[in-house]
Image: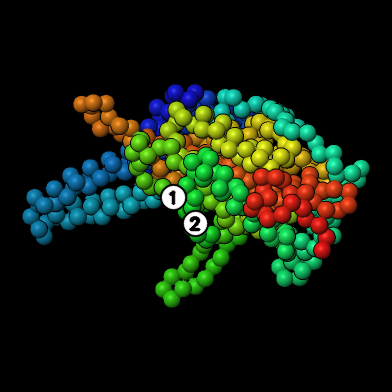
Amino acid sequence: MQPRRAAAVERLCHPWYRADMLDLRFVVDNLDEVRKALGRRGPQHTVLLDQVADLRGRRSSGIQARDAKIQAQKGANEAMAKAPKSTPEFAQKRDELKVLSAEIKRLEGDVAAIEAQIEEILLGLPNLPDPTTPDGKGEQDNQVLRVWGERPTAVGDKPRDHVDLGTALGIIDFERAGRMSGARFGVLVGDGARLERALTQFMLDLHTREHGYVEVEPPVLVKGESLRNTGQLPKFEADLFKTEKQGADRAYDLYLSPTSEVQLVNMHAGEILDEAQLPIRYTARTECFRSEAGSYGKDTRGLIRNHQFGKVELVQLVAPEESERAHEALTGHAERVLQKLGLHHRVVALCTADLGFGARKTYDLEVWLPGQSAYREISSCSNMGDFQARRAQIRYRKAPAQGGAKEKPRLLHTLNGSGLAVGRTLVAVLEQGQRPDGSVVIPEALRPYFGKDVIAKR
Protein backbone atom coordinates (compact mmCIF):
# COMPACT_ATOMS: atom_id res chain seq x y z
CA MET A 1 0.00 0.00 0.00
CA GLN A 2 2.70 2.48 0.95
CA PRO A 3 4.49 2.82 -2.44
CA ARG A 4 1.19 3.30 -4.27
CA ARG A 5 -0.03 5.78 -1.69
CA ALA A 6 3.26 7.69 -1.84
CA ALA A 7 2.92 7.94 -5.61
CA ALA A 8 -0.67 9.12 -5.29
CA VAL A 9 0.13 11.96 -2.94
CA GLU A 10 3.14 13.31 -4.80
CA ARG A 11 0.97 15.30 -7.17
CA LEU A 12 0.23 18.93 -6.43
CA CYS A 13 -3.36 18.87 -5.22
CA HIS A 14 -6.17 20.96 -6.57
CA PRO A 15 -6.87 23.73 -4.01
CA TRP A 16 -10.25 22.19 -3.17
CA TYR A 17 -8.56 19.03 -1.87
CA ARG A 18 -6.25 20.88 0.51
CA ALA A 19 -8.44 20.32 3.57
CA ASP A 20 -8.74 16.57 3.01
CA MET A 21 -7.08 13.90 5.09
CA LEU A 22 -7.00 11.39 2.25
CA ASP A 23 -6.60 12.23 -1.40
CA LEU A 24 -10.00 11.84 -3.08
CA ARG A 25 -8.57 10.21 -6.19
CA PHE A 26 -6.59 7.76 -4.06
CA VAL A 27 -9.68 6.86 -2.01
CA VAL A 28 -11.85 6.21 -5.07
CA ASP A 29 -9.20 4.47 -7.15
CA ASN A 30 -8.22 2.22 -4.22
CA LEU A 31 -11.61 1.88 -2.54
CA ASP A 32 -11.25 -1.77 -1.51
CA GLU A 33 -7.77 -1.18 -0.14
CA VAL A 34 -8.87 1.89 1.83
CA ARG A 35 -11.96 0.06 3.13
CA LYS A 36 -9.79 -2.81 4.34
CA ALA A 37 -7.31 -0.47 6.04
CA LEU A 38 -10.00 1.60 7.77
CA GLY A 39 -11.82 -1.60 8.72
CA ARG A 40 -8.81 -2.50 10.86
CA ARG A 41 -9.79 0.46 13.08
CA GLY A 42 -13.39 -0.73 13.30
CA PRO A 43 -16.36 -1.22 10.94
CA GLN A 44 -17.81 2.21 11.83
CA HIS A 45 -15.07 3.88 9.78
CA THR A 46 -15.96 2.25 6.44
CA VAL A 47 -19.66 3.02 6.07
CA LEU A 48 -19.12 6.34 4.29
CA LEU A 49 -16.68 5.12 1.63
CA ASP A 50 -19.38 4.04 -0.86
CA GLN A 51 -20.97 7.46 -0.44
CA VAL A 52 -17.63 9.09 -1.32
CA ALA A 53 -17.40 7.08 -4.54
CA ASP A 54 -20.97 7.97 -5.48
CA LEU A 55 -20.41 11.65 -4.74
CA ARG A 56 -17.23 11.75 -6.78
CA GLY A 57 -19.12 10.30 -9.75
CA ARG A 58 -21.87 12.91 -9.34
CA ARG A 59 -19.24 15.65 -9.06
CA SER A 60 -17.58 14.53 -12.31
CA SER A 61 -20.94 14.39 -14.09
CA GLY A 62 -21.83 17.83 -12.77
CA ILE A 63 -18.55 19.31 -13.99
CA GLN A 64 -19.00 17.75 -17.43
CA ALA A 65 -22.55 19.11 -17.66
CA ARG A 66 -21.40 22.56 -16.57
CA ASP A 67 -18.54 22.58 -19.09
CA ALA A 68 -20.91 21.55 -21.86
CA LYS A 69 -23.21 24.45 -20.99
CA ILE A 70 -20.22 26.82 -20.97
CA GLN A 71 -19.31 25.70 -24.49
CA ALA A 72 -22.93 26.17 -25.57
CA GLN A 73 -22.83 29.63 -23.99
CA LYS A 74 -19.75 30.52 -26.05
CA GLY A 75 -21.48 29.39 -29.23
CA ALA A 76 -24.63 31.35 -28.42
CA ASN A 77 -22.53 34.41 -27.61
CA GLU A 78 -20.75 34.23 -30.95
CA ALA A 79 -24.03 33.71 -32.84
CA MET A 80 -25.64 36.68 -31.10
CA ALA A 81 -22.66 38.86 -31.97
CA LYS A 82 -23.14 38.03 -35.66
CA ALA A 83 -26.91 38.57 -35.68
CA PRO A 84 -28.21 42.05 -36.51
CA LYS A 85 -29.52 43.83 -33.45
CA SER A 86 -33.25 44.35 -33.02
CA THR A 87 -33.98 41.19 -35.00
CA PRO A 88 -35.89 38.09 -33.85
CA GLU A 89 -32.69 36.04 -34.24
CA PHE A 90 -30.77 38.40 -31.91
CA ALA A 91 -33.54 38.28 -29.31
CA GLN A 92 -33.66 34.48 -29.51
CA LYS A 93 -29.90 34.16 -28.91
CA ARG A 94 -30.10 36.63 -26.05
CA ASP A 95 -32.85 34.55 -24.40
CA GLU A 96 -30.78 31.40 -24.92
CA LEU A 97 -27.85 33.07 -23.16
CA LYS A 98 -30.00 33.94 -20.15
CA VAL A 99 -31.21 30.35 -19.87
CA LEU A 100 -27.65 28.99 -20.25
CA SER A 101 -26.29 31.40 -17.64
CA ALA A 102 -28.94 30.30 -15.17
CA GLU A 103 -28.22 26.62 -15.86
CA ILE A 104 -24.47 27.14 -15.43
CA LYS A 105 -25.04 28.90 -12.13
CA ARG A 106 -27.28 26.07 -10.96
CA LEU A 107 -24.78 23.40 -11.99
CA GLU A 108 -21.93 25.25 -10.24
CA GLY A 109 -24.02 25.36 -7.09
CA ASP A 110 -24.72 21.63 -7.35
CA VAL A 111 -21.00 20.86 -7.77
CA ALA A 112 -20.09 23.09 -4.82
CA ALA A 113 -22.66 21.33 -2.64
CA ILE A 114 -21.30 17.91 -3.60
CA GLU A 115 -17.74 19.08 -2.90
CA ALA A 116 -18.81 20.28 0.52
CA GLN A 117 -20.33 16.86 1.27
CA ILE A 118 -17.15 15.07 0.17
CA GLU A 119 -14.99 17.42 2.21
CA GLU A 120 -17.09 16.79 5.32
CA ILE A 121 -16.78 13.03 4.89
CA LEU A 122 -13.05 13.06 4.22
CA LEU A 123 -12.38 15.36 7.15
CA GLY A 124 -14.09 12.77 9.34
CA LEU A 125 -12.10 9.79 8.08
CA PRO A 126 -9.17 8.83 10.35
CA ASN A 127 -5.71 8.07 9.07
CA LEU A 128 -4.95 4.67 7.58
CA PRO A 129 -3.09 2.53 10.14
CA ASP A 130 0.44 1.46 9.34
CA PRO A 131 0.73 -2.22 8.33
CA THR A 132 2.92 -2.79 11.41
CA THR A 133 0.31 -1.39 13.82
CA PRO A 134 -1.14 -4.39 15.70
CA ASP A 135 -4.80 -5.22 15.15
CA GLY A 136 -7.13 -5.06 18.10
CA LYS A 137 -10.55 -4.13 19.44
CA GLY A 138 -9.50 -1.96 22.40
CA GLU A 139 -6.72 -1.02 24.80
CA GLN A 140 -6.61 -4.57 26.11
CA ASP A 141 -5.04 -5.52 22.76
CA ASN A 142 -2.17 -3.01 23.01
CA GLN A 143 1.23 -4.70 23.03
CA VAL A 144 3.86 -4.09 25.71
CA LEU A 145 7.17 -3.76 23.88
CA ARG A 146 9.53 -3.21 26.79
CA VAL A 147 9.63 -2.39 30.50
CA TRP A 148 12.29 -0.13 32.01
CA GLY A 149 13.44 -0.11 35.61
CA GLU A 150 12.07 -1.72 38.74
CA ARG A 151 8.97 -0.74 40.65
CA PRO A 152 10.00 1.44 43.61
CA THR A 153 10.17 -0.38 46.95
CA ALA A 154 10.82 2.56 49.30
CA VAL A 155 7.23 3.79 49.23
CA GLY A 156 5.97 1.53 52.00
CA ASP A 157 3.17 -1.02 52.12
CA LYS A 158 0.44 1.53 51.51
CA PRO A 159 1.72 4.12 49.04
CA ARG A 160 -0.20 7.36 48.91
CA ASP A 161 -1.28 9.03 45.70
CA HIS A 162 -0.05 12.49 44.70
CA VAL A 163 -3.21 14.17 46.00
CA ASP A 164 -2.64 12.99 49.57
CA LEU A 165 1.11 13.49 49.30
CA GLY A 166 0.92 16.96 47.79
CA THR A 167 -1.77 18.12 50.22
CA ALA A 168 0.15 16.87 53.25
CA LEU A 169 3.35 18.53 52.03
CA GLY A 170 1.49 21.77 51.32
CA ILE A 171 2.62 21.88 47.66
CA ILE A 172 -0.70 21.19 45.87
CA ASP A 173 -3.97 22.95 46.65
CA PHE A 174 -7.11 21.67 44.97
CA GLU A 175 -9.58 23.36 47.30
CA ARG A 176 -8.44 26.89 46.47
CA ALA A 177 -8.15 26.00 42.76
CA GLY A 178 -11.76 24.86 42.85
CA ARG A 179 -12.91 28.10 44.44
CA MET A 180 -11.22 30.23 41.80
CA SER A 181 -11.76 28.11 38.69
CA GLY A 182 -13.95 25.10 39.42
CA ALA A 183 -13.35 21.38 39.07
CA ARG A 184 -10.40 19.88 37.17
CA PHE A 185 -7.87 22.55 38.21
CA GLY A 186 -5.01 22.57 40.70
CA VAL A 187 -2.69 25.13 42.26
CA LEU A 188 1.00 24.29 42.77
CA VAL A 189 2.52 26.09 45.75
CA GLY A 190 6.11 26.51 46.93
CA ASP A 191 8.08 23.35 46.17
CA GLY A 192 5.22 22.18 43.94
CA ALA A 193 5.60 25.16 41.63
CA ARG A 194 9.37 24.88 41.89
CA LEU A 195 9.23 21.20 40.88
CA GLU A 196 7.07 21.99 37.85
CA ARG A 197 9.55 24.66 36.75
CA ALA A 198 12.53 22.36 37.32
CA LEU A 199 10.96 19.55 35.29
CA THR A 200 10.17 21.92 32.43
CA GLN A 201 13.71 23.29 32.25
CA PHE A 202 15.21 19.81 32.56
CA MET A 203 13.12 18.51 29.64
CA LEU A 204 13.81 21.49 27.38
CA ASP A 205 17.54 21.34 28.04
CA LEU A 206 17.63 17.60 27.34
CA HIS A 207 15.78 17.91 24.04
CA THR A 208 17.64 20.96 22.75
CA ARG A 209 21.14 20.03 23.91
CA GLU A 210 21.16 16.26 23.44
CA HIS A 211 18.54 15.63 20.77
CA GLY A 212 18.89 18.67 18.51
CA TYR A 213 15.41 20.20 18.83
CA VAL A 214 14.88 23.92 18.31
CA GLU A 215 12.95 25.53 21.16
CA VAL A 216 9.87 27.54 20.20
CA GLU A 217 7.67 29.86 22.26
CA PRO A 218 4.40 29.93 20.28
CA PRO A 219 1.05 31.69 20.85
CA VAL A 220 -1.48 29.79 22.93
CA LEU A 221 -4.51 31.08 20.99
CA VAL A 222 -4.86 29.50 17.54
CA LYS A 223 -7.18 29.74 14.55
CA GLY A 224 -9.67 27.06 13.66
CA GLU A 225 -7.72 26.52 10.44
CA SER A 226 -4.63 25.53 12.43
CA LEU A 227 -6.66 22.99 14.41
CA ARG A 228 -8.17 21.65 11.21
CA ASN A 229 -4.71 21.25 9.72
CA THR A 230 -3.61 19.00 12.58
CA GLY A 231 -6.85 17.01 12.87
CA GLN A 232 -8.42 18.46 16.02
CA LEU A 233 -11.25 19.96 13.97
CA PRO A 234 -13.93 19.10 13.18
CA LYS A 235 -13.59 15.75 14.99
CA PHE A 236 -12.81 17.07 18.50
CA GLU A 237 -14.71 20.36 18.59
CA ALA A 238 -16.39 19.37 21.87
CA ASP A 239 -13.03 18.97 23.63
CA LEU A 240 -11.80 22.48 22.79
CA PHE A 241 -12.14 25.80 24.58
CA LYS A 242 -13.16 28.57 22.18
CA THR A 243 -12.96 32.32 22.68
CA GLU A 244 -15.30 34.80 21.03
CA LYS A 245 -14.67 38.53 20.97
CA GLN A 246 -16.34 41.16 18.83
CA GLY A 247 -13.73 43.53 17.43
CA ALA A 248 -14.31 46.98 15.99
CA ASP A 249 -14.59 45.67 12.45
CA ARG A 250 -14.61 41.85 12.68
CA ALA A 251 -15.19 38.93 15.02
CA TYR A 252 -12.27 37.13 16.62
CA ASP A 253 -12.92 33.42 17.06
CA LEU A 254 -9.82 31.74 18.45
CA TYR A 255 -9.26 28.51 20.36
CA LEU A 256 -7.06 27.73 23.34
CA SER A 257 -4.58 25.20 22.00
CA PRO A 258 -5.02 21.62 23.32
CA THR A 259 -1.37 20.81 22.53
CA SER A 260 1.53 22.74 21.05
CA GLU A 261 1.67 20.09 18.34
CA VAL A 262 -0.88 22.39 16.69
CA GLN A 263 1.42 25.41 16.70
CA LEU A 264 4.62 23.54 15.85
CA VAL A 265 3.16 21.72 12.83
CA ASN A 266 1.56 24.93 11.57
CA MET A 267 4.90 26.74 11.69
CA HIS A 268 5.29 25.64 8.06
CA ALA A 269 1.67 25.46 6.86
CA GLY A 270 1.41 26.32 3.16
CA GLU A 271 5.17 26.23 2.64
CA ILE A 272 7.40 24.34 0.23
CA LEU A 273 10.66 23.45 1.97
CA ASP A 274 13.95 22.42 0.43
CA GLU A 275 14.99 18.85 1.12
CA ALA A 276 18.18 20.20 2.72
CA GLN A 277 16.06 21.80 5.49
CA LEU A 278 14.82 18.39 6.65
CA PRO A 279 14.53 17.00 9.21
CA ILE A 280 13.04 19.83 11.25
CA ARG A 281 12.77 19.25 15.00
CA TYR A 282 10.83 21.60 17.27
CA THR A 283 10.11 21.53 20.98
CA ALA A 284 7.94 23.84 23.06
CA ARG A 285 6.60 24.06 26.57
CA THR A 286 3.10 25.52 26.63
CA GLU A 287 -0.03 25.52 28.67
CA CYS A 288 -2.61 23.22 27.09
CA PHE A 289 -6.39 23.35 27.47
CA ARG A 290 -8.94 20.56 27.06
CA SER A 291 -12.50 20.24 28.26
CA GLU A 292 -12.03 16.46 28.55
CA ALA A 293 -15.45 15.91 27.01
CA GLY A 294 -16.67 12.36 27.55
CA SER A 295 -14.21 11.57 30.35
CA TYR A 296 -16.59 12.07 33.26
CA GLY A 297 -15.70 9.76 36.13
CA LYS A 298 -12.34 8.83 34.62
CA ASP A 299 -9.11 10.00 36.31
CA THR A 300 -10.93 12.95 37.87
CA ARG A 301 -8.87 12.89 41.05
CA GLY A 302 -5.82 15.15 41.19
CA LEU A 303 -3.63 16.31 38.31
CA ILE A 304 -4.03 13.43 35.87
CA ARG A 305 -6.83 14.86 33.70
CA ASN A 306 -7.16 18.61 34.26
CA HIS A 307 -8.59 21.29 31.99
CA GLN A 308 -5.25 23.14 32.02
CA PHE A 309 -1.83 21.50 32.09
CA GLY A 310 1.75 22.12 31.06
CA LYS A 311 3.38 19.96 28.40
CA VAL A 312 6.71 19.84 26.60
CA GLU A 313 5.97 18.79 23.02
CA LEU A 314 8.22 17.23 20.38
CA VAL A 315 7.45 17.61 16.66
CA GLN A 316 9.44 16.45 13.66
CA LEU A 317 8.96 17.17 9.94
CA VAL A 318 10.75 14.61 7.80
CA ALA A 319 10.92 13.09 4.33
CA PRO A 320 8.55 10.10 3.99
CA GLU A 321 11.36 7.56 3.69
CA GLU A 322 12.74 8.75 7.04
CA SER A 323 9.50 8.73 9.05
CA GLU A 324 9.75 5.20 10.49
CA ARG A 325 13.30 5.81 11.70
CA ALA A 326 12.28 9.25 13.03
CA HIS A 327 9.37 7.70 14.93
CA GLU A 328 11.67 5.33 16.77
CA ALA A 329 14.08 8.18 17.52
CA LEU A 330 11.37 10.56 18.79
CA THR A 331 10.00 7.84 21.07
CA GLY A 332 13.50 7.32 22.40
CA HIS A 333 13.86 11.04 23.06
CA ALA A 334 10.69 11.07 25.17
CA GLU A 335 11.65 7.85 26.95
CA ARG A 336 15.07 9.30 27.77
CA VAL A 337 13.39 11.81 30.10
CA LEU A 338 11.90 8.98 32.16
CA GLN A 339 15.16 7.04 32.16
CA LYS A 340 17.24 10.00 33.39
CA LEU A 341 14.67 10.62 36.11
CA GLY A 342 14.82 6.95 37.08
CA LEU A 343 11.06 6.49 36.69
CA HIS A 344 9.82 2.94 36.17
CA HIS A 345 7.75 2.76 32.96
CA ARG A 346 6.85 0.68 29.95
CA VAL A 347 6.51 1.26 26.20
CA VAL A 348 3.31 0.08 24.54
CA ALA A 349 2.39 -0.23 20.85
CA LEU A 350 -1.23 0.87 20.42
CA CYS A 351 -3.52 -1.42 18.47
CA THR A 352 -5.66 -0.19 15.58
CA ALA A 353 -8.80 0.35 17.71
CA ASP A 354 -6.89 2.47 20.27
CA LEU A 355 -5.02 4.52 17.69
CA GLY A 356 -5.52 8.29 17.69
CA PHE A 357 -7.56 9.88 14.90
CA GLY A 358 -4.62 11.27 12.92
CA ALA A 359 -1.99 8.65 13.72
CA ARG A 360 -0.93 5.72 11.61
CA LYS A 361 1.28 4.27 14.35
CA THR A 362 1.69 5.17 18.04
CA TYR A 363 3.87 4.17 20.94
CA ASP A 364 2.58 5.13 24.39
CA LEU A 365 4.95 5.63 27.30
CA GLU A 366 3.19 4.55 30.50
CA VAL A 367 4.69 5.46 33.86
CA TRP A 368 4.04 3.48 37.04
CA LEU A 369 2.03 5.33 39.70
CA PRO A 370 2.24 3.49 43.06
CA GLY A 371 -0.65 5.51 44.49
CA GLN A 372 -2.96 4.10 41.82
CA SER A 373 -1.12 0.77 41.51
CA ALA A 374 -1.35 1.22 37.75
CA TYR A 375 0.47 2.42 34.69
CA ARG A 376 -0.69 5.75 33.27
CA GLU A 377 0.06 7.23 29.85
CA ILE A 378 2.58 10.06 30.07
CA SER A 379 3.38 10.42 26.36
CA SER A 380 1.93 9.31 23.02
CA CYS A 381 4.54 9.29 20.26
CA SER A 382 2.84 9.14 16.88
CA ASN A 383 3.79 8.89 13.25
CA MET A 384 1.10 10.86 11.39
CA GLY A 385 2.39 10.09 7.91
CA ASP A 386 1.13 12.72 5.45
CA PHE A 387 -2.19 13.19 7.31
CA GLN A 388 -1.35 16.63 8.71
CA ALA A 389 0.92 17.66 5.84
CA ARG A 390 -1.92 17.20 3.35
CA ARG A 391 -4.34 19.29 5.40
CA ALA A 392 -1.75 21.99 6.10
CA GLN A 393 -0.14 21.71 2.65
CA ILE A 394 3.39 21.33 3.99
CA ARG A 395 5.57 20.09 1.18
CA TYR A 396 9.21 19.76 0.30
CA ARG A 397 11.13 19.63 -2.95
CA LYS A 398 13.84 17.06 -3.51
CA ALA A 399 17.10 18.33 -4.91
CA PRO A 400 17.22 17.53 -8.65
CA ALA A 401 19.83 15.18 -9.98
CA GLN A 402 22.74 16.87 -11.67
CA GLY A 403 21.42 18.32 -14.91
CA GLY A 404 17.93 17.02 -14.13
CA ALA A 405 14.60 18.84 -14.18
CA LYS A 406 13.20 20.58 -11.12
CA GLU A 407 11.32 18.16 -8.90
CA LYS A 408 7.62 18.58 -8.10
CA PRO A 409 6.78 19.33 -4.46
CA ARG A 410 5.95 16.33 -2.29
CA LEU A 411 4.07 16.01 0.98
CA LEU A 412 6.35 15.37 3.91
CA HIS A 413 5.57 13.40 7.08
CA THR A 414 4.95 14.79 10.57
CA LEU A 415 5.57 13.13 13.92
CA ASN A 416 4.77 14.26 17.44
CA GLY A 417 4.96 13.20 21.04
CA SER A 418 4.94 14.60 24.55
CA GLY A 419 8.39 14.97 25.92
CA LEU A 420 6.76 14.92 28.51
CA ALA A 421 3.44 15.96 30.04
CA VAL A 422 4.91 18.01 32.91
CA GLY A 423 2.06 17.58 35.39
CA ARG A 424 1.96 13.81 35.00
CA THR A 425 5.75 13.67 35.35
CA LEU A 426 5.41 15.65 38.58
CA VAL A 427 2.85 13.10 39.76
CA ALA A 428 5.24 10.23 38.95
CA VAL A 429 8.17 11.93 40.74
CA LEU A 430 6.04 12.40 43.86
CA GLU A 431 4.56 8.91 43.91
CA GLN A 432 7.67 6.94 42.96
CA GLY A 433 9.90 9.10 45.14
CA GLN A 434 7.76 9.01 48.27
CA ARG A 435 9.07 7.58 51.53
CA PRO A 436 7.09 6.15 54.46
CA ASP A 437 7.54 9.38 56.45
CA GLY A 438 5.69 11.37 53.72
CA SER A 439 8.76 13.08 52.27
CA VAL A 440 9.73 12.79 48.60
CA VAL A 441 13.23 12.11 47.22
CA ILE A 442 14.07 14.17 44.12
CA PRO A 443 15.68 12.27 41.20
CA GLU A 444 19.41 12.91 41.04
CA ALA A 445 19.31 14.31 37.48
CA LEU A 446 16.71 16.88 38.58
CA ARG A 447 18.50 18.14 41.68
CA PRO A 448 20.62 20.79 39.90
CA TYR A 449 17.36 22.28 38.59
CA PHE A 450 15.32 21.88 41.76
CA GLY A 451 18.04 22.96 44.19
CA LYS A 452 17.64 20.29 46.85
CA ASP A 453 17.39 16.55 47.32
CA VAL A 454 14.16 16.08 49.26
CA ILE A 455 10.72 17.67 49.64
CA ALA A 456 9.63 17.45 53.26
CA LYS A 457 6.80 18.95 55.24
CA ARG A 458 7.68 22.43 56.46
Are discs 1 and 2 less than 8 Å apart at CB? yes
Label 1: element kind: helix
Residue in the picture at 46% in, 49% down: 266
Residue type highlighted by circle 2: Pro
Q: Mark 2 highlights which residue?
A: 218
Image spot of residue 337 (x, y percent)? 63, 41
- Asked if residue 292 lies left or right of residue 125, the reply is right
**Mark toward the start of the polypeptide (1 vs 2):** 2
Judge the density around disc 1: few (<14), some (14-19), many (≥20) Cα neighbours within 10 Å: some
Mark pair 1, 2: CA separation: 9 Å
Residue type highlighted by circle 1: Met
Judge the density around disc 2: few (<14), some (14-19), many (≥20) Cα neighbours within 10 Å: some
Q: From this view, report whether residue 155 is shown above or below residue 138.
A: below
The reply to whether residue 283 is visible in this rendering is: yes
Residue in the picture at 80% in, 36% down: 151
- Asked if residue 434 lies left or right of residue 117, the reply is right
Residue in the picture at 27% in, 29% down: 400
